[in-house]
Image: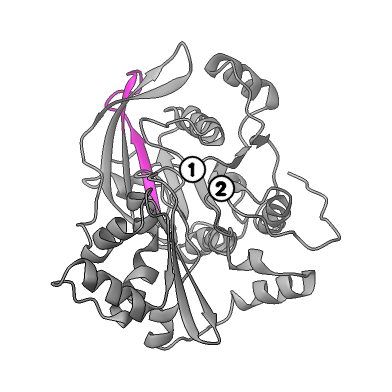
Amino acid sequence: MRIDKETTAPIPSVAPDGEQPSALARTDSIAEFEETYKQFGKMRVMTMPELMETRFPLRPAVIEGLLPAGTYLLAGAPKIGKSFLVLQMAYQVSMGEPFLGFSPRQGTVLYLALEDTYERLQKRLAQMTEQDSERLILSVFSETLDEGLTERLSDFWSEHADTVLIVIDTLQRVRSRTPDNGSYAADYDTLARLKEFSDTYGVTVLVVHHTRKEGAEDVFNTISGTNGLMGAADGALILYKDKRTASDAVLEAVGRDQQQLRLHISFDAAHLHWELVEAETEQFRQPPNPLLEFLSRLVNEENPTWDGTATELAQCLSEMDNECSFTPNWIVRTLNARQDTLLRQYGVRYHSRRTKDGKTLSLRWDGVR
């Protein structure tokens, strides 16, 4: 993959959900951009009060309930259908179409099909769909990590700031070719470098990999390589079958930000795509938060905006219900930590800003997702 680097500063672009893609996107010049990038590799400290006062940029899931934001592995035996699965995922996310029944966050998708040819991709897509997607971008060539892959991905992001997903198929094609390749340290470093890019730019990275032949009680222990891969990744998906020739398979997902999920899926050979048969594990849902419940009554389609201080919000909520006793500090802490849930489940977007009079909170009705 080759992208000629622009000589001007990357222009920040608002992501599809209205949030800036990442902290780095809020820079105004190349010098500032590169200096901020350097800081990501250094130890930075925050006091607990500073941490709890900080409102981090939202990182919505790419596929709600299945693929959260972050860096993930998709592993399975060779020729089991992984490439069909990720090509289908890449296409449907770029189109905003449900993937295996799960709702995606639409945006640009880069698919590095490094074990395929353009001719093969053309034939597969022609059989898979009749409609083209301008937001699906494909390449069958790429540098390795040692050759500058993450720099090329940064260049790609500067030209496509609405990118939500990058699929690398496969890990072996981009990993370092060093004598210690295959050690825990090498495995960890490989995924950590991709994760640093993902965390910096707010783009989810899905890396296709293989599983070992030996069985294991925990299917995630069949991922080829050391535990360094899972240690550095935010999670993993495993695709496996009882019989290689069977059309039915199981897709399991586990990660830091989701409960383990098991999907029974079936391959439609006529259209080259996977279909959901049954979700064995229900999607994880956090228990209702009383503050968010009250805020959904305060800000909604009929009353779409609210602005004020945390103290004013606490007073407003107590007037709605005499038994409501939220302190201003607790309100700010909860909003900072649960802003994604407030937006996703209640359709309310939260912002905060400091003025000469203190911190002002803004709540805006955005519609239930």
Q: Are marks 1 and 2 in contact (CB under 8 Å)?
A: yes
Q: Position of residue 66 (x, y in %)?
A: 36, 43
Q: Residue at x 21, y 41 (%)?
A: 282
**Which image quarter: residue 9?**
bottom right
Q: Position of residue 170 (x, y in %)?
A: 55, 42
What's under tag 2, amino acid-wise? Pro
Residue at the far right: name it: 7
Give the label on residue 16, or none.
2
Q: Is residue 2 magenta?
A: no
Residue at the far left: name it: 323
Mark found first going from the N terminus, 1 or 2: 2
Q: Tell whether 132 sits left or right of 340.
A: right
Q: Residue at x 51, y 87 (%)?
A: 357
From the image, which quarter does the N terminus lie in?
top right
Q: Secondary structure at mark 1?
A: loop
Give the label on residue 271, or none.
none
Q: Is residue 233 above or below residue 323?
A: above
Q: Position of residue 95 (x, y in %)?
A: 55, 31
**Residue at the spot of label 1:** 105
Q: Is residue 55 above or below residue 12?
A: below
Q: Is residue 293 above or below residue 309?
A: above
From the image, which quarter does the C terminus lie in?
top left
Q: Residues within 10 Å of mark 2 (few under 14, many from 20)?
A: some
Q: Tell whether 61 sits left or right of 136.
A: left
Q: Secondary structure at mark 2?
A: loop
- Residue 212 showing in the rendered view: no
- Residue 320 showing in the rendered view: yes
